[in-house]
Amino acid sequence: MRHRTLRGGAVLAAVLLLTSASIAFADTIPADGDAVTPGNQTTIALGERAPGEVVQWNVTLRLVCAGFNHAPAGSVISVLLAGKSVPLDGSVTATDTTIGPVPDDWPTAGLPCAGQVLASGEPTVVTLTMPTAPGKGYQYSLVWARSGSGLSGGTVMDFTADVVVNTPPSLTLPNPITVEGNATNGATVSYSAVATDIEDNPDPTPVCNPTPGSLFGLGTTSVGCTVTDSGGLSATGSFGVTVVDTTAPSLNGVPAGASATTGNAAGTVVSYTSPTATDIVDPNPSVGCLPASGSVFPVGSSTVTCTATDASANHASVSFPVTVTFVPPVTWSATWGEPISSPDATFMANAGRTIPIKVEMFANGVEKSRGQAALSIVGCAGGETLAMPLSWDGGRWTGHIDTGMLGGGCYRVTASLDANDAGSFRLDLRGADTAGGTTTGRPKR
């Protein structure tokens, strides 16, 4: 049903009469409510509007050369709203505007037109207030009149609207979501929130925070969503996203095992490289091993257990063996032959003498005839060590000490086999080599 209320009827009728009488013979001022669509759109459909809604619309007015009666060059044409009709308790206003000044090349009276058009400096802004009662086919009619050109006339424009009661949109959100952590410090979570609205097409789009695809931290995060329809009505809602971490860390670089030998029946210190750990959520899981690297391990087989723990108290453990083998220590000894009387004896000789060395070396009482045998000589007070090889000959290791290479004084002479010291004696050098050398200690053999 179309509802119309005529206001300013006398003015409207007069303007319409002037318009119809002069439009065919003089310049016109058509109204255009759509600056994009070609031509002059004099009827504008506003579609569905809410009760009491205020709508603003720009209308372009132009001076169009027509007929043989024309606006004088240099004149400025004022265009104002001269008449209107509105439905029920609706209302309408429009701002005034001007066209001109009319250019000098505008046709003078009696001359035909060549398609000249002159637009207004600013559009006229139409403000329409919708009726408060819902209804369809409401129509607003507006008439603009002109003055200042020496010509009369005006232009007419209609606006139509359907007034409907707006309802808020409907928001559909997910149920509470629980996800396993899938990223450092939380989880990337996607979800879908949708809205529907009876009046809007397409439906409005909800806005949520945090947005879908965001990183959610461990624990429960409330996601708030809001949707607003074209009529300004909104709906809000929320749901929870809970991120849990139930996945244990992974241990990397676990030793296959470790081993050591010792001559100590109580065991020995064993060191190993501890494994590392990685975790999907925790960037720095801890790793602890028992017994720790560097601990004393007993003789035999032991088990090391390494445990990785993340910030959520998830843990994983791995084990590897440590084997300590007891190797009885070797007792080395030496028997010195002439001219050295016995181990730990003191042999005195004149400097410059060559001293023959004859020595037998034993490991745990077993004589050794193979290996790298050597004699080392160092001052009793320390200093540089002189080394010379020994060779196996006739059932013993033999060599010579050329004391001419040594200065006088006290020396410690040590026999070794494969770097194992077997025995030593003290050598005291004195004077010239005139009386040979003597040994103090046990009698000579």
Image (cartoon, grey):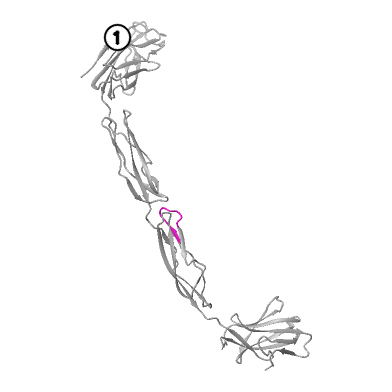
Judge whether residue 282 is colored magenta: yes
Drawn side of residue 354 relative to residue 190, left or right: right
Q: Which of these two is toward me, 257 or 36? A: 257
Q: Position of residue 329 (x, y in %)?
A: 55, 81
Crowding at dot 1, Cα within 10 Å, few <14 / some 14-19 / many 20+, comes out as: few
- Name the image quarter holding the C terminus: bottom right
Q: How many discs mark residues in the rendered view?
A: 1
**Spot occupied by residue 22 in the image (x, y as percentages of width and height):** 29, 7
Q: Which quarter of the figure has residue 382?
A: bottom right
Q: Which residue is mark 1?
A: 8
Q: Quadrant of residue 346?
A: bottom right
Is 128 drawn above or below residue 247 in the view shown? above
Callout 1 amino acid: Gly
Q: Position of residue 124 (x, y in %)?
A: 36, 16
x, y percentage for residue 259? 48, 73
Reply yes or no: does residue 132 show up in magenta.
no
Label 1: which secondary element: loop
The residue nearer to you, when weighing 91 against 289, is 289
Using the image as rendered, state which of residue 338 and residue 314 is in the foreground.
314
Residue occupying the point 25% across, 19% down: 138
Start-end of magenta stretch:
276-285
In the displayed image of the protein, which residue is found farthest to the left?
A: 1
